[in-house]
Amino acid sequence: MSSDLAMRIVAEARAWIGTPYAHQASLKGVGCDCLGLLRGVWRGVIGTEPEAPAPYAPDWAEAGGEDALMRAATRWLVPAEGIETGRVLVFRWRDGLPAKHCAIATAPDAMIQAHDGARVCEVTIPPFWRRRLAGVFGFPPPRGGLARDKGRAGVPLSLVERG
């Protein structure tokens, strides 16, 4: 990934800081979950999302047992080695469980994430998260230049009405 692309990814992710947590949402300043943050950064930097996620419950990974987040990451992102600026980090709570959380690295020791009960924030990556790292990915290069955020794509109507 080029350093210009990495810096654009980080700038877009930082623009989401302060967005409240909202399950299944992906609207900057209104609400998002970790996947919604990743989707929003994709829209802001790459363009139209390659696929819309199916509705999912808060316990989707445990209930289904499928590794849907990791499968989607390997389908649309570029596998990478090491935590570097602009990379997508995918986490699983324990070995053998499906991946259930993602974040965007802003440096080798920092990331931006959305998680239940908090607003999108930039934090250091402590040993707790490093032990749970299941995959590292890069964004694909944008086709035809960098995109602008298209706004409300993939947002539950209830959040759009409030926003």
Image: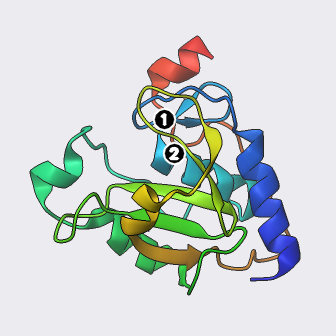
Instruction: Give amino acid for label 2.
Output: Gly
Residue located at (32% from left, 50% from top): 54
Residue 110: quarter of image: bottom right
Please say if 40 is above or below 5: above
Q: Do we see residue 48 in this rendering? A: no
Q: x%, y% of residue 17?
A: 70, 36
Residue located at (64% from left, 73% from top): 139
* Quarter that holds the C terminus: top right
| Residue holding disc 1 | 25
Which labelled disc corresponds to residue 54?
Answer: none
Residue neighbourhood size for the residue with mark 2, other residues' Cα within 10 Å, grouped as few (<14), some (14–19), many (≥20): many
Tag count: 2
Q: Secondary structure at mark 2?
A: helix
In the figure, is residue 31 to the left or right of 139?
left
Q: Quick one: which residue is furthest to the front in this view?
A: 127
- Tell which of 55 and 4 is nearer to you: 4
Q: x%, y% of residue 158?
A: 46, 18
Residue located at (11% from left, 49% from top): 63
| Residue holding disc 2 | 36
Q: Secondary structure at mark 1?
A: loop
Residue located at (51% from left, 21% from top): 159
In the figure, is residue 121 to the left or right of 131?
right
In the figure, is residue 98 to the left or right of 79?
left
Between the C-alphas of marks 1 and 2, the distance is: 6 Å
Residue neighbourhood size for the residue with mark 1, other residues' Cα within 10 Å, grouped as few (<14), some (14–19), many (≥20): many
Q: x%, y% of residue 31?
A: 55, 28
Colouring method of the image:
rainbow
Q: Are marks 1 and 2 in contact (CB under 8 Å)?
A: yes
Please say if 29 is above or below 104: above
